Amino acid sequence: MTTNTKTSSIRTVIVGVGNCASSLIQGVSYCRQKGDDAVGVSFPDLGGYTPAQVDLVAGFDVDSRKVGLTLAEAAFAAPNCTERFHTDLADQTAPVLRGPDLDGVAAHMLTKPEDRSFRLSAEPAMTKEEIVAKLRELRAEVMIVFLPVGSQKAVEFYVECALEAGVAVVNGIPVFIASHPVWAEKFRAAGVPILGDDFKAQFGATIVHRTITNLAEMRGVEIDRTYQLNVGGNTDFLNMTEHDRLANKRESKTEAVQAVMEQRLDDNDIRIGPSDYVPWLNDRKVAYVRLEGRLFGGARTNIEIRLDVEDSPNAAAEALVAIRLARIALDRNMAGPIAEASAFLFKHPPEQIEDTDAHDVILKFVSGDQD
């Protein structure tokens, strides 16, 4: 979709300067320098906004190796281990500020090897009042949340800050905000838009799993059982070795697949979620997807797929879409969950829509051509 490019930037703050944030920081600079030659950009133009117009004005983190640095420096600081696909970050001079710990750091993450886990900064954490004031001072327009899985209290804290400061939210993790009716009403009441929850990666395990499931349904295959097992070596996978932090993640990924089935599978016949932590994989994620079913006459069939991807750039590509859609929602004075902009990008959106339809819905949303 091509329109006249807007000249204004999209002032964005990042909550959680981990691997996904690193890929986002690199990606903004990459798109600025490469322009039309940038590879793999989702929706190069959305309503006149390009990825190069995302202006990262601050980050919030708790790690001593990131707090007090610029985003350029923090992007490659330990324990980040994602691919360095663009290292010229001279334009990323915004500061990383000390946010509160809350439940953003699991206890076990403080006991693992230093280059693999977190080390808390000795700097005093900013209060809610200070963060709200900082968001206003920065004239922030969009907040993107990249906190570790299981950070329920921390996500809610930052969302409250955004609501008070009038900042749109893009919730990239499986803490249910956009898809939760109580939070949805809070955003409507505050006149603030939110997109979420939990990114579907550009070409990740969930979108691939949904696609083959949808294909089987469309061709009349009776699906009997399926699984998706994921392993990786970044801090997200290490964080998720504490299974208590996994409940929403497993629900989000499972629901994303169940939603494309005409008849939901019994819980015993579907298993989806992170399975193990393999340190040497670093930011690579390897997904094993299997689907078993029956063809005409009950003839058996099955399909197995092994997907190997760099995890964080896969999410950052869609983050650049979501940030621009949030800005469009702000331009239109929209409030509450933006369902039309969320279904294509997130595993647990306010409303599940089949992916090819959801793609068209985004284009209609951007053009303003909505029923």
Image (cartoon, helix red, strand yellow):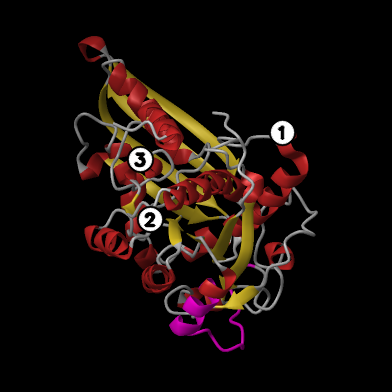
Residue at image point 44% right, 59% down: 168
Q: Which residue is mark 1?
A: 36
Under circle 3, the secondary element is helix
Task: Tell me which segment is drawn in magenta.
Answer: 116-135
Q: Which of these two is toward me, 337 or 49?
A: 49
Quarter holding the C terminus is top left
Q: What is the spatial separation of the Cα atoms under label 1 and label 2, in whole angstroms? A: 29 Å
The residue under label 2 is 193
In which quadrant of the rendered view does residue 11 lie? bottom right
Badge 1: how crowded within 10 Å, few (<14), some, or many (20+)?
A: few
Helix, strand or loop: magenta stretch = loop
Judged left or right of residue 9, residue 77 is right
Residue 178, located in which quarter of the rendered image? bottom left
- In the image, what residue type sits under mark 2? Pro
Q: The N terminus lies in which quarter of the figure?
A: top right
SS under mark 1: helix
Q: Please state the horizontal and vertical placement of residue 231, each as a whole percent of the image.
A: 51, 49
- The residue that mark 3 highlights is 340
Check disc 3 and give the amino acid type.
Glu
Q: Between marks 3 and 1, how big is the CA–CA gap?
A: 27 Å
Q: Position of residue 107 (x, y in %)?
A: 47, 78
